[in-house]
């Protein structure tokens, strides 16, 4: 079955510290992988996406993610977080081709400690 | 561009009433998606349109839910009759291209409360 797991429901890090949000997926074919961010009261905004090629993907706002096929993971990282990064982060997986559902993880809420 | 516009932002209605949620996608986008977000079930795709045609409605929970896209600049999601378990935030998103793997631009959502 297709699934996306974000094992951390809530993470708190200090401003300026590094961040890694975990995402594991189960998918029968080559997946498209996404990270979205949702600020309070807002819709989701795409941070980055991976389709193929270089497994280290750069996104907006200084985020990056690394696709590791052997671990079925697509973890999101940022070397130094800012208070404005406090939000909910969603990992998602979709099929390589044809219209079908994108499956979202349950989300990880990030809090920033001053 | 103003982005994806949803209305209303908040809706409180009584059980049994009809509810209509509205969405204006980004101009030039040919794909439109309706999602529902709840604490219990997370973010679920309800239905997706391409060029105003429904492509995949397998996520629509039951017959009480219906969605239309009469033209490229407008879509509605209707719930009739509404039930308390329909309470959620409903997001509309639009994108370019045919399949779901195009980037989706989300609206700010409609928070629906059915009492």
Image (cartoon, grey):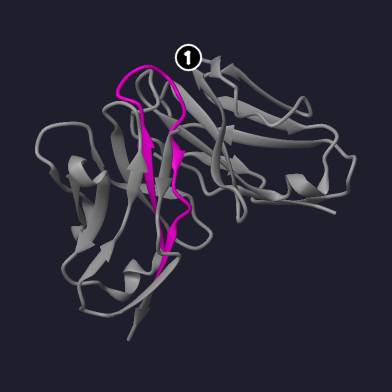
For label 1, the residue is B51
Residue extending furthest toward the left: A54
Q: Nearer the viewer, residue B41 or A82?
A: B41
Residue under the image location 22 percent in, 32 percent down: A51
Observer able to see residue B3: no
| Residue A2 percent across, percent down from the top left | 43, 34
Q: Which of B70 and B43 is in front in this view?
A: B43
Magenta highlight range: A88-110
Judged from the image, the secondary structure of the residue bearing numbered disc 1 is loop
- The part of the image, by quadrant, that contains residue A38 is bottom left
Kindly identify which chain the residue marked by label 1 belongs to.
B
**Quadrant holding the N terminus of chain B:** top left
Horizontal side of residue A108 vs B21, given as left or right: left
Q: Nearer the viewer, residue B51 or B99?
A: B99
Residue under the image location 41 percent in, 39 percent down: B105
Horizontal side of residue A96 vs B26, given as left or right: left
- The part of the image, by quadrant, that contains residue B44 is top right
Horizontal side of residue B63 vs A19, given as left or right: right
């Amino acid at each position: 079955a297709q699934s996306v797991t974000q094992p951390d429901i809530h993470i708190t890090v200090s401003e300026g510290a590094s961040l890694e949000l975990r995402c594991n997926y189960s998918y029968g074919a080559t997946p498209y992988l996404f990270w979205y961010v949702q600020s309070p009261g807002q819709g989701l905004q795409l941070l980055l996406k991976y389709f193929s090629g270089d497994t280290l993907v750069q996104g907006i706002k200084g985020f990056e993610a690394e696709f590791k096929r052997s671990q079925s993971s697509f973890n999101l990282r940022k070397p130094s977080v800012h208070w404005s990064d406090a939000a909910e982060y969603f990992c998602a997986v979709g099929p390589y081709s044809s219209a079908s559902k994108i499956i979202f993880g349950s989300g990880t809420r990030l809090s920033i400690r001053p | 561009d103003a982005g994806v516009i949803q209305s209303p932002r908040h809706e409180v209605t009584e059980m049994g009433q009809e509810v209509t949620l509205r969405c204006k996608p980004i101009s030039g986008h040919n794909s439109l998606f309706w999602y529902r977000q709840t604490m219990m079930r997370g973010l679920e795709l309800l239905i997706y349109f391409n060029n105003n045609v429904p492509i995949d409605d397998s996520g629509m929970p039951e017959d009480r839910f219906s969605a239309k896209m009469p033209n490229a600049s407008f879509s509605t999601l209707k719930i009739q009759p509404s039930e308390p378990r329909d309470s959620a935030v409903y997001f509309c998103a639009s994108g370019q291209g045919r399949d779901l793997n195009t980037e989706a631009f989300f609206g700010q959502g409609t928070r629906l409360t059915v009492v």
